[in-house]
Image (spheres, rainbow, N blue to C red):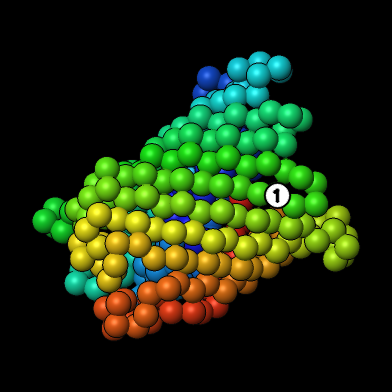
Amino acid sequence: MCAGGAAFAEDPATRWNGPFGGTFSASLTVVSEYSFAGISQTNRQPAVQPGLHYRTPSINEDINLWAYVAAWGSNVDFPGTGPGIEVDLLTGIKFLAFERRLTVDMGYVRYFYPGVPGSFAYDYGDFVVSVGYDFDLFQLNGRVRYSPNSFGASGNAWNKRALLTVPLPFLRVNENISFKVYGTLGNQYVDLPQNYGIPNNDYWYWQTGLVISAYGFDVTIAYTDTTIDYAGCGYTTNCQSRVIVGISKYF
């Protein structure tokens, strides 16, 4: 909901048999706005976000490693270009160890903005490494994204983010309803902030939220904010504190 297409590949439900012994899954999210690294990508307007994911089978029963490809999309609305769409294509490998407690995900994401003139240089790619561990009481995940030439030809970019997720089993209503809370803290750096649309080389962003999983749907209520002020965000409220609500269905 709030992290772009890369999030879709982290732990999709596997539903349909695919070629080469692999499996397909899909998702559909409707959200009050699409936020990426704390900045609204839809000018604080709603977004619809479909996704499709394919993963290969694990190498064998002892080595829980597989490859994946995925596609994800959303409507966007940027100052200067107006309403449009974003399409993300992902590929990578994922590895689980220590009784599935440790998760390592290494991949690449390419972001496309069809219809936007090439002179805007919106299309770019990220190399992504994500490492997580399940401590039973909570899950901790760290992720680094690197782009050699990020959004708007803004040069080298680094995005570093930590995610803490805490299940709330004592709030379980029945076997079909569960709750968890999460919090993220991240930092975005770019070489050329004026091209990226921010006032300085880097800024911090954070988000905290509640996820209610019920009968195959995830309902998320989140609060997000950044260190970018109103003037630094192009005199818009796209970087200001706000509440985001979304609902997702996995197939």
x 30%, y 77%: residue: 232
Number of callouts: 1
| Disc 1 residue type (three-letter) | Gln
- Judge by depth and name the residue closer to the eye, 200 or 145: 200
Q: Is residue 144 above or below residue 238?
A: above
Q: Is residue 176 visible?
A: yes
Q: Is residue 109 above or below residue 56?
A: below
Residue 107 image position (x, y, % from top left): 44, 35
x 27%, y 71%: residue: 199
- Judge by depth and name the residue closer to the eye, 235 or 179: 235
Residue 187 image position (x, y, % from top left): 44, 59
Q: Which residue is mark 1?
A: 139
Using the rendered view, name the quadrant where residue 178 is placed: bottom right
Q: Is residue 232 left or right of residue 192?
A: right
Q: Is residue 136 above or below residue 237?
A: above
Q: Is residue 14 above or below residue 207?
A: above
Using the rendered view, name the quadrant where residue 14 is placed: top right
Q: Is residue 123 left or right of residue 135?
A: left
